[in-house]
Image (cartoon, helix red, strand yellow):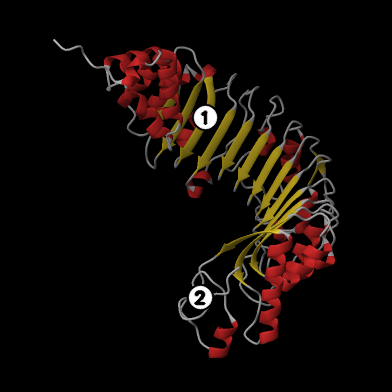
Amino acid sequence: MEPQILSPIHLLPCELLISILSLACLGCSTPEERFKLPCRLSQVSKLWNAIIVKTPTLSSLIYIHDNSVKEQLLQRITRSAGVALDVSIDNKPCSSLKPQMDIIAYSSGRWRSLEVNSWGSECIKLILPAFLPRLEELSIRCEDADVANGLAFSLTSDMPKLRRAVLKSLPVTWSTCTLAGCNLESLELIRCGVSPEDLPVFLDFLESLKSLRRLVLDEIWLNFWEIGVTQRTITLPLLKELVYRGIPSGRVLNWIQSPNLEKLVVGRPLWAEGQRWMPVNISFHSVQHLELYHLSTSSAALINLLYSAPNARHITIVSSNLGRSMLFPDIVMQRGVWKELESLAIHGVFSLVQLKKVVLMHSSTIKRVNVHFLDCGLGMDASRHEFEEAADARDWLKKHVSLGVDRTTTTYGTRFRTWDDMVRGRLMKPNEVECYDL
């Protein structure tokens, strides 16, 4: 009888095989796949089944959805044998997860992370026990804004180890939120309505988070253009990254200050009809990374924000306006000098000639320029001399700095309008003329 031939993987030590299986689970793209994978792997062989059953960490993810089987949840919780649990809940419209929630509630003392994607208010009301001693990450996203509008959500649970929290589309009762007892480091608030009447208690809530290092405020403001925005300022001493999206007024930028702020991101302002950016006295002297998105419709906003960070080392400007008259990055970047500017990234319509002047002004410090062209900034009335100037500027930039170029597909394919296009006076196909290639 011939000896049985074993696959090389069966000769691996159990510790190494456990590591491989753990990496396979962590590589899953969704919680549902990660939840199902151990069951599938256990069917490979008796050895694998024995290892998976006896390894609690491979059963540490609990995934709950409409069709979750109670027995399967109980088996998973039992196999996890005291290790920290990652809980993921996916609640579809018109469904109730109360039976499943009752099953995992008694293990809440082991929850390490909780992720909820809900289409109904019932699930959100059930998920947070009074005491979560090991919870480090919390993410609650309500995908149905109409349902959320009828929900009064409040963070009242005791979560002493909470480090990161994400709340989306939840009308939070800020006056009853109590996170001061935890060492929260990252907080993202996405479309969680803050009305002008709520603003004082909302700022009190933020001010209590002294350990915060990253804060994202994304379209949380309700009807702020109808009344004046408060001039109150709070200080978060450890804050290093501050992100604003959908701000209704420049005065919002005065709400939060930090002596250690390193990165400031401002994007997608929401203007009421007829409203314009009113320059505000803001100062972010400690900021080294400045990113400005979609401010092309307001030169005042762009200037105001760029000059508020005179010590910035890395600047990113992204514009969504395709008009060739909106060359604000060119104008603004020449008016200000950043003594320590090392890298510049611009996405949008601007002039290569102007960009060369900017680099010359910062030639002693700037090392890298990244551009993503939508156009080279030359209008339909541009002369041949202007096209030649742009070509010379391009050659100079490639020689003196690390020039990275990304290109967007436009009317001319993945190239830019050339002098030949101007002469012919019509739209050309990409293969009909020589490309204006950077």
- Helix or strand or loop: what does disc 1 sit on? strand
Image-based side of 345 in relation to 307, left or right = left
Q: Position of residue 139 (x, y in %)?
A: 55, 35
Residue 55 in percent (x, y) is at: 42, 14
Of mark 1 and mark 2, the one earlier in the sequence is: 1
* Type of amino acid under label 1: Leu
Q: Quadrant of residue 260?
A: top right
Q: Is residue 331 left or right of residue 218?
A: right
Label ID, residue 217 = none
* On screen, residue 354 above or below 185: below
Image coordinates for residue 273, horizontal then vertical, percent = 66, 69
**Residue 206 shows in the view:** yes
The residue positioned farthest toward the bottom in the image shown? 424
Helix, strand or loop for disc 2: loop
Quarter assignment of residue 303: bottom right
Can residue 71 be seen? no
What's under tag 2, amino acid-wise? Tyr
Q: Are marks 1 and 2 in contact (CB under 8 Å)?
A: no
Q: Residue at x 70, y 74 (%)?
A: 392
* Residue 5 drawn at (x, y percent): 24, 17
| Residue at the left extreme, as displayed | 1
From the viewer's perspective, is residue 174 above or below residue 247? above
Q: Which mark is residue 114?
A: 1
Q: Pick the quarter of the image with the N terminus.
A: top left
**Residue drawn 68% across and 32% down?**
185
Q: Quadrant of the C terminus?
A: bottom right
Residue annotated with mark 2:
412
Q: In the figure, residue 435 lies in which quadrant?
A: bottom right
